[in-house]
Image (cartoon, rainbow, N blue to C red):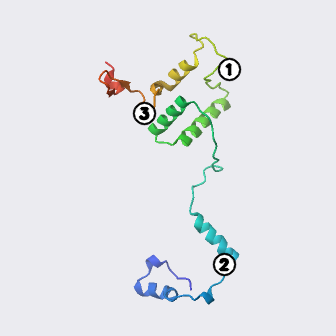
Amino acid sequence: MKPTKPYSKMNTDELADATREFDTNISPEQWQPMTLQQRARWERSKRGRGRPVVGEGAERIFISMERRLLRVTDEIARRLQKNRSQLIAVSLRQYFATIARGQRPLSAAPADGGIRKATKSHPTKGDFYRKSMGPFSEVDKPGRALGMRRASAGRAKHPVSSKK
């Protein structure tokens, strides 16, 4: 018998009447195998709710990245209160939008992949990182806060307080 209203809205007497069938034990002779519909429902309930699907869903991938760039990525993600995957996804969307607008995206390495001498009009790879990362270019060692400089006493100073 299906209750006419939710259990949470029933008073004590109504709840007792609605659940009376569960007060007795079921003997093994009454057991039956689940139907296909019951089995499907059981499997869905065992899986739990899961993660919500965003867009077309997510695919797990493995990529290689320079350690320094990974540290910067993690620090920026932490500051923006995002996870690494979210930050990379947003960055790729912005990169693709730049290309779609017909603009030439920034490149960290020469197009020919070779090593070139730095000039004012053609900075080196390191110059690209320093300029493009702005305040985030200070991450050199694990655990070192971005934009922080070591004081002579060995304590980190806030960048605003260290400038005069």
Give the image location of residue 143, x and y in percent: 42, 33
Spatial CA span between label 2 and label 3 = 55 Å
Disc number for residue 34: 2
Local SS, label 2: loop
Q: Residue at x 49, y 85 (%)?
A: 19
In this view, which residue lies farthest toward the left?
Answer: 153
Amino acid type, residue under disc 2 in the picture: Met
- Residue ID for mark 1: 113
- Quadrant location, the N terminus: bottom right
Nearer the observer: mark 2 or 3; the answer is 3
Q: Classify mark 1: residues with Cα within 10 Å, few (<14), some (14-19) or many (20+).
A: few
Q: Residue type at mark 3?
A: Gly
Checking the image for residue 143, the label placed there is: 3
Q: Report helix, strand or loop for mark 3.
A: loop
- On screen, 65 above or below 39? above
Q: Is residue 135 above or below residue 31?
A: above
**93 or 151, which is in the foreground?**
151
Measure the C-alpha gap from mark 3 to mark 1: 31 Å
Please state, as top left, top right, bottom left or bottom right, where the C terminus lies in the image: top left
